Image: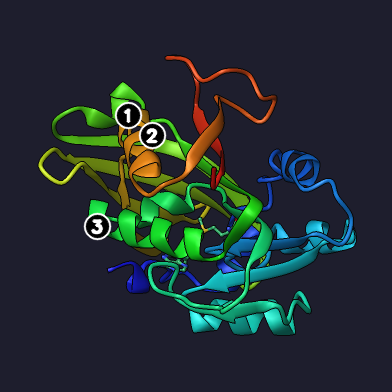
């Protein structure tokens, strides 16, 4: 269940993803009208909230994990992230911009979950709203049989234990459910395991996302393959959708 997705602490999340900054200017350029309202689904610890609020946007975020929500309030001073499940949340208001970034869509592990999410999205749009998705494009190498080990996918300084850690990733693809089972081992410099963490990500191909967006009544205005707004093609690492309601 996605409710158990983030077993890593919010501190560890922030420490681990210190390097993820390449989407910030992209989102700022998408939401370039001052005082517009923006709703982020799966807002996490507020990594994107801070630059968007500084830009003068009226930012709100929905996040499943109560621990992450409290951390966003206390540490990043973002009271506008609230606890909720993006598959059924109802805020009784509409927003100028709505988005789900940094692969959070892949935490919707079934097609039914994605459909429920898109119904929620539509409920929170008005006739001029724009909705964006940013998620990885499945790479053929994910889909091999058997376990795949990637040795050093990221390293970072952990401020809790004041040590550098390296992440070793193992992937196992489930063909029936089109889900990747991911295991991350956090290794200390002496190669012992500090922590281990298992989670799942749904593999979404562009044709599935396009079909479900259309079926849920959303109109796709653009599909890009990266933050530079290049068109999506077979070499793209990302699939980024911009949708309106009509
Ligand atoms: C990869 S993090 C992205 C966080 C943030 N958007 C960012 O860009 O740093 C994914 C987040 O999705 C949240 N999440 C997973 N399933 C969710 C759901 N059904 N509703 C709301 N949030 C969810 C997780 O708790 C986690 O914080």
Q: Quarter of the image for the N terminus: give it.
A: bottom left
In the drawing, does residue 29 fall left or right of residue 3? right
Q: Which residue occupies the foreground of this view, 169 or 193?
A: 169
Q: Secondary structure at mark 2?
A: helix
- Residue 19 pos. (x, y %): 68, 45
Crowding around mark 1 (Cα neighbors within 10 Å: few <14, some 14 to 19, many 20+) is: few
* Residue at figure coordinates x 33%, y 54% from the top left: 114
Distance Cα–Cα, label 1 vs label 2: 5 Å
Q: Earlier in the sequence, mark 3 or mark 2?
A: 3
Per the image, the residue denoted by label 2 is: 210
Instruction: Answer with left or right where residue 175 lies relative to residue 242.
Output: left
Residue 169: % across, % down:
37, 44
Q: Is residue 110 visible?
A: no
Q: What quarter of the picture does the C terminus occupy?
A: top right
Q: Is residue 67 above or below residue 104?
A: below
Measured Cα–Cα span from mark 1 to mark 3: 16 Å
Give the secondary structure at mark 3: helix
The residue labelled by disc 1 is: 207
**Picture layout, residue 203 above or below residue 56:** above
**Residue name at image x 32 percent, y 55 percent:** 115
Judging from the image, what secondary structure is the residue with disc 1 in?
helix
Q: Are marks 3 and 2 in contact (CB under 8 Å)?
A: no
Q: Earlier in the sequence, mark 1 or mark 3?
A: 3
Residue, far top = 234
Residue 53 visible in the snapshot = yes
Query: x, y percentage for residue 53?
Result: 83, 64
- Mark 3 highlights which residue? 112
Distance from Cα at disc 3 to Cα at disc 2: 15 Å
């Amino acid at each position: 269940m996605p409710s158990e997705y983030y077993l890593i602490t919010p501190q560890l999340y922030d420490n681990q993803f210190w390097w993820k900054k390449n989407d910030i200017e992209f989102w700022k350029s998408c939401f370039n009208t001052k005082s517009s309202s923006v709703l982020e689904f799966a807002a996490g610890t507020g990594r994107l909230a801070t630059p968007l609020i500084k830009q003068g946007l009226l930012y709100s975020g929905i996040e499943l994990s109560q621990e992450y929500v409290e951390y966003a309030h206390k540490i990043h001073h973002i009271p506008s992230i609230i606890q909720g499940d993006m598959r059924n949340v109802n805020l009784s208001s509409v927003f100028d911009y709505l988005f789900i970034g940094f692969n959070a869509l892949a935490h919707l592990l079934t097609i039914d979950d994605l459909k429920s999410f898109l119904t929620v999205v539509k409920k929170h749009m008005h006739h001029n709203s724009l909705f964006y998705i940013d998620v990885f494009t499945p790479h053929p190498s994910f889909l091999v049989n058997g376990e795949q080990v990637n040795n050093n996918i990221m390293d970072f300084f952990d401020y809790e234990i004041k040590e550098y850690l390296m992440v070793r990733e193992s992937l196992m693809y489930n063909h029936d459910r089109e889900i990747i089972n991911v295991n991350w081992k956090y290794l200390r410099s002496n190669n012992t395991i500090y922590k281990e963490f298992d989670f799942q990500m749904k593999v979404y191909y562009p044709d599935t996302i396009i079909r479900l967006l259309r079926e849920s009544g959303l109109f796709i205005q653009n599909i890009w393959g990266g933050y530079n707004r290049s068109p999506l093609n077979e070499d793209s690492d990302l699939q980024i959708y911009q949708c309106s309601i009509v």
